[in-house]
Image: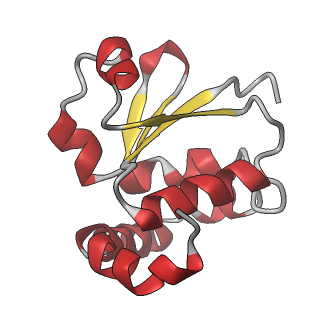
Amino acid sequence: MSKLGTAILIYDDKCSLCRGCMRWIELHAVSKDVFEFIPCQSEDRRRRFPEMTDETCLQSFQLVLSHNTILGSDKALPEILIRLRGFRWLYSLFKLPISRACLYAVYRWVSSNRYIISQTIKPLIRE
């Protein structure tokens, strides 16, 4: 896993859905050090990534790879999947154009409705 290096996942800490996804990713990571999680609202994020605006990281999660390559939203999903136990096979699926198009549409819908979804599933996620 050292080939991939640690990826920094920046998420909205005020969103139950985002926190739940972050915890799920943490539980399924191939190793403990493959992800670092930073809330978008934190001073740590602002200090380490001053080029990333609050608006950008509140719109969708951001994944920072080595050499400060930043991937947002649906573009980050394949890089997350390759770092998860049991889900690496999906990485190849996302290389297909039709998969990317569908993924983008689904991600945009979820992202646009995440606070409504969060309120619906809030009882399922421990605060």
Q: Nearer the viewer, residue 36 or 86?
A: 36
How many marks do you count on the picture? 0
- Residue shown at 36%/49% (left/top)? 12
Q: Position of residue 26 (x, y in %)?
A: 69, 48
Q: Nearer the viewer, residue 69 or 8?
A: 8
Q: Position of residue 73 (x, y in %)?
A: 37, 53
Q: Quadrant of the N terminus?
A: top right
- Residue shown at 18%/31% (left/top)? 53
Q: Is residue 7 visible?
A: yes
Q: Is residue 123 above or below residue 90?
A: below
- Residue shown at 59%/30% (left/top)? 7
Q: Nearer the viewer, residue 38 or 89?
A: 38
- Residue shown at 21%/41% (left/top)? 56
Q: Position of residue 29 (x, y in %)?
A: 76, 47
Q: Going by the picture, which residue comes out furthest to the bottom?
A: 120
**In the shown orientation, is residue 82 left or right of residue 64?**
right
Q: Is residue 70 above or below residue 116?
A: above
Q: How is the image coloured?
A: secondary structure
Dividing the picture into quadrants, the one containing residue 41 is: top left
Q: Nearer the viewer, residue 87 or 60?
A: 60
Q: Is residue 95 visible?
A: no
Q: Is residue 35 above or below residue 26?
A: above
Dividing the picture into quadrants, the one containing residue 25 is: bottom right
Dividing the picture into quadrants, the one containing residue 101 is: bottom left
